[in-house]
Structures are given as structure tokens and as C-alpha cells.
Image (tube, rainbow, N blue to C red):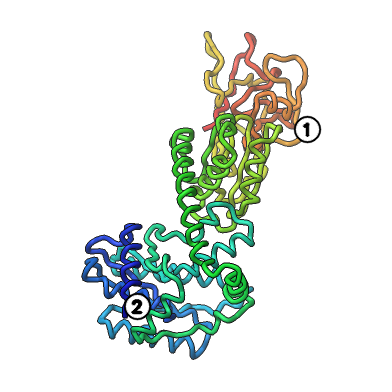
Amino acid sequence: MKKSTELLDRIRKTIVRYHMIGPGDKVIAAVSGGADSVCLVHVLYRLSRELDLRLVVAHFDHGWRPGEDEFETELVRSFAFSLGLPFETAKSPSRMKKGLLSLEESARNERYGFLERVREKHLANRVALGHHLHDQAETFLMRVLRGSGVSGLAAIPPTRDNLIRPLIEVTRDEIELYVKERELSFAVDSSNLNTDLFRNRIRLELVPLLLQYQPRLVEHLGEMTSTLREESEFLDSLSAEWIGKETGPHSNKKISIPLQRFLALPAVLRKRIIRKILVTLRGSVRRIGRKHVHAVDGLAKSTQPQGRLNLPERLIVKRTYDFLHFIYQDEGVTEGFCYCLDGPGTFYIQEIGKSLSLSVRDKEEKWSPPASPWTADLDLEKTRFPLVIRSFRPGDRFIPLGMKGHKKLKDFFVDLKVPFDVRRTTPILLQQETPVWVGGCRIDERFKVTPSTRTILEARLT
């Protein structure tokens, strides 16, 4: 039993080093029935008095393998009861028949959702998972082959949020030796032999081949991922500090950063900031890869003053002159709008969430132009109903107040550096097809209030 005692000591040191468990903590142990998860529960059970922790065993049945699934559930149930531990189980409500990779990801989401529900039910502090050093090495190799960046190559973290991985620094061979020495029953998952799955091909084909060149491959890759994780965490801290300093308060759907100060940073820090902002907006960016981050960085460095990128996860990045805007779009893009206005009143423009109020009044003796760009005073005799309020269209032309000649509205927007998305939602008040007022910007010279004006039509956007 010497080797299993040594293993226990190493796992204890891992738990302490990464502050995985505190005195009085309740821990949900995720147990599939395989050797690694059985080892996990047994080790935590042996350490429970010393670490002052309480354990709950949780098992999720995906329902993929009739016969095997039921056997594993009963195996884990019996094991939990033999240790006097509470047991929770659930079965997947559906048998998904998608492509294998989609199936694998869906299964993962279901499993983690179940574990979180169990954690909340038992008011537990942590969820313990059975990932070990071989899992770490396999994940690293998978991500190398998929072209991951530094944060991806850091592979599996020992802790993340409520998740802990006490076995992350021990090998599969050590785990299997432990359960055999202790004569602990475990199941062998037949799906682990399915080489249609990428991870299984790495485990069954690539790792054995590489071990012929370097017998300590798994340990070396574990050390490498640890170093990469430390460097990645340092970059994360620098990124968070810069974002907090340069963005100030922001919504959970949009974060804007100053372009010139961003471009002054080293490329490696810029890319980490990009990824961190996207994670902040979306929570998870599993479909955001290195190519997407490079594309955003390219947009920032572009010589074009404006541009837009549509990313996965309904994320949008826009460049508007001096800023880079990161947006999570949970609703469809606003389409063009057009409303006919027969007379004074208040009209709600649903597409942009604004109201237009039109009211008539006599001109004051000491009249002065409105101070707000969202209010326009127009000569009523020149501004005849019906009017139209609509979105910008290519070809729109008007005579901006203070000018003599016509100007394309597009060129007018460019002169004012109005971003593309703002142009799309800027309301235009028209008489027939002639713009009377570009909301928030300027009225047309032909409709202005003059000394001979007697009655004013006030237009106000709120």
C-alpha cells in the first residue's frame, strides 16, 4: 500500500497548493464509474476528516449504452452507499442523434448542468472532477493540432469557478494502480474505444506513438501546461487592469475601447484583451478561435476608419473612427423603417426605440434656435403635412442649414464621422422625398425659421 499512500500525499498537496477545499466545505464528486472517478471519491473520502469536508456522490447517465449505463449507475450507487455517502443521479432526457462532435458537446453541457443543480440542491461549495495528468496531456495535444493560442494550450486548469480537479497532477497509471491495490470496483466505458472521436484517437494512437520517443511525455506536457497557465494568468491580469482603466462603466452588451491607446499595446496583450472582452460579453466563447481574434486585431489596425466583423456567438465588433466597439447582439439587426405622419402628435418608432413629438406653436417675439440637437424648430408654412419619418436611404440629399448647395446625406454623415450603425438608426423627417430634418444632426436650410415665420412646427425626439 506504499504507492497508494504516496499518491494520497501528492493529491493532498495538490488540493492545498491550489486552495481547492476549505474547512467545512461540501463537495459534489462527479463519478462516472471509471477508475479515475472512483479513485477521486475514495481519496476525498479518506481525506474528509483531515480536511473537514463533506462529500456527495453524483452520477449522470447519458443513456447512450443500454446495459452498460444501468450497470455503471448501480456500481456508483453501491460504492457511495458502502462509504455512507449521499448519492444523486439523473438520466439524460433525450437520445441525441447528431454528429459525434455535436453529441459530445451536448453531453458535456447536460452533465455540467446536472452537477450544478446537485451543487445548488445540497448547498455545496465545490464540484470535484476526475481529470488527471493524462487528460491534461491529451487536451494539450488536441489543442496543438487544432491551432489553439496560449490560453488554449494551458489546457485544463486545476480550478475554475466552482470546479476542482484534485487528480490533475497524477497519471492514469497511478490511478489504476491505486484502485487495484485497494480492490475497488470500476467500470470500463466501451465508448472510450471509439476512434471516431478525436480525443480517443489522441489517447489510443498518438500518445502511445509519442511515448516511444519520450517515456516521460505526459509529465513533461503537464509541466509545460503549468508554465503556460502561469503566463496566461499573468496576461489575464494585465488585460483586466487595462480594460478596467480604459473602458470605465459599461453595459453587459457593449464594451468600447479607445483605438489609439489599444494599438499602442504589444500584439500579445491586444489579443488577450480582445478575447477577455468577448468572454465578458458572452460568458463562453467556445466557438471563438484564434482566427477570429486575429481578425479583430486586423480590424483595429486597418487604415479604413470604419468596419465591422460578425463573429460566432452573436458577437459583433465595429470600428468607428477612434473606437473599437464589442457588442453582444441578442436581438435581430434593426431593419429600415418608414411611417407616415398626418398631423401633430407623438409617434413611437419601434425599430429604434424612440418617440417623435410634433407640436405647433406661434413664433415667440424673441425666438432662438433649440439648444438640443434632438429638437428642431421648422417653419410650418414650408413644412406641410403629411410628413414621413424613416431611416436613411442611399441617394438621400438635402441642403444642410447654413449651406447653399445640395449635399448627399452619406457625405454629410462622413463629414460628421457618424458611425455606420448610427446612420442606420438615424431618423429622417421628410416632406414627400425631401429631408426636412436629420434627427440629432441638422435641419434643411429651406425649412428654417426666418424673421417672416409666424408659426413653428417643433419636432422633438426622445
Please state if 281 lies on the left or on the right of 389 as rendered.
Answer: left
Q: Are marks 1 and 2 in contact (CB under 8 Å)?
A: no
Badge 1 or badge 2: first in the primary sequence: 2
Please state if 140 lies on the left or on the right of 184 as rendered.
Answer: right
Q: Amino acid at mark 1?
A: Gly
Residue at 38% across, 63% down: 164
The one nearer the camera, 236 or 175, is: 175
Residue hosting label 2: 88
| Residue 438 higher or lower than 61, as above or below | above
Find numbered disc 2 in the image and state the secondary structure of the residue it sits on. Answer: strand
**Where does residue 333 sit, x and y in percent of width and height?**
62, 47
Q: Which is more foreground, mark 1 or mark 2?
A: 2
The one nearer the camera, 229 or 53, is: 229
**Where does residue 277 sit, x and y in percent of width and height?**
52, 45
Looking at the rendering, which quadrant does residue 174 occupy?
A: bottom left
Residue at 48% across, 48% down: 231
Query: Would residue 101 be seen by someone viewing this image from the given angle?
Result: no
The one nearer the camera, 327 or 200, is: 200
Q: Amino acid at mark 2?
A: Glu
Residue hosting label 1: 395
Locate the N terminus by quadrant.
bottom left
